[in-house]
Amino acid sequence: MTSIKTETIEIDDCKLNIRRVGRGRPLLWLHGTDGLAEWPALIERLGEQHEVIAPDHPGFGDSTVPGWMADVSDLAYLYLDLLKRFGLERVDVVGHSLGGWIALEMAVRQTQRMASLALIAPAGIHVKGASKRDIFMIDPDEQARLAYADSALAEAAAIRASAGKYQEMAIANRVASARFGWNPRFHNPRLERWLHRVDVPTLVMWGNEDRIFAPEHAEAFMRAIPGSRLAMVEKAGHMPHMERLDETHRVLAQFLAR
């Protein structure tokens, strides 16, 4: 494993825990509702060409959440302030699930410091008729099981999620997820109206067997974001970067090297 540097910074009344890995053009990794308890191997791969900056969202991991922080728009402004604090320019932003939603809320506000946007099964919009699993109504082990298309990987993920050392973190992650995605469930009714403002190259990736957010969401994002590209990952669920690492990395690396 590549050496990981960890730091905690005070920003916007929040103690933000940040990990950095690799060297090269900066890349901001925004995690999903599962947090970063399991360090994705994709980050290691991306670190071969980029300096990956991976914060714990407020309320997740070792980051604190101030009382005033109420929704994903607050997270968007937080990370825009983070890019400014670090003096970063032309940053590639990669977000999974909740992290993809945050990335989109950043992009509709300001892309001045962003070079590109890569969204892996992002939340953020409601698509009429497309299924979306309510993760607050199922146990963490069932959520982990549903996140994978491969039955063996799904069962292994469920076993990990029910292990004692993960249960406390899973509860904390769920509380934080509820803070930002409870009502309405994991979308902003006004976001789709403003997706035309995303003016950086955008890649939308989706597992073709996603049982958390149905793949129909992918085409809706592509239609709403001007010039965006769609990449479906075969035999993958909601975690294509974990389940189909090589394919996900290949597509993402080609996009980032454009």
Image: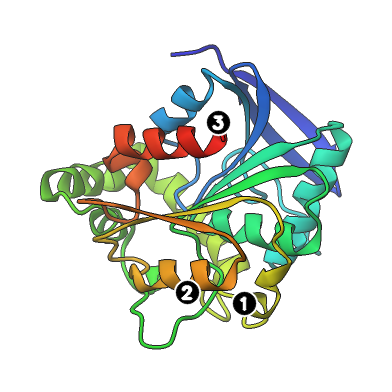
Q: CA distance from mark 3 to mark 1?
A: 28 Å
Q: Are marks 2 and 1 in contact (CB under 8 Å)?
A: yes
Q: At 28% from the left edge and 55% from the top edge, which residue is drawn? A: 237
Residue 7 lies, with reference to residue 224, above or below; the image says: above
Q: Quick one: SS at disc 3?
A: loop
Would you name the residue on which mark 3 appears?
A: 257
Say which label, 2 or 1, has the lower sequence index.
1
Residue 220's disc is 2
In-front residue for pair 163/246: 246
Local crowd size for mark 2, using a 10 Å CA cut-off: few (<14), some (14–19), many (≥20): some
Q: Amino acid at mark 2?
A: Ala
Q: Quadrant of the C terminus?
A: top right
Q: At 23% from the left edge and 55% from the top edge, which residue is drawn? A: 145
Left/right placement of residue 204 relative to residue 208 reads right
Would you name the residue on which mark 1 appears?
A: 192
Say which label, 3 or 1, has the lower sequence index.
1
Q: Percent from the top left, x then y, of residue 4?
A: 57, 17
In-front residue for pair 253/60: 253
Q: Are marks 3 and 1 in contact (CB under 8 Å)?
A: no
Q: Nearer the viewer, mark 2 or mark 3?
A: 3
Q: Amino acid at mark 3?
A: Ala
Q: At 62% from the left edge and 77% from the top edge, which residue is drawn? A: 192
Confirm whether residue 49 shows in the render: yes
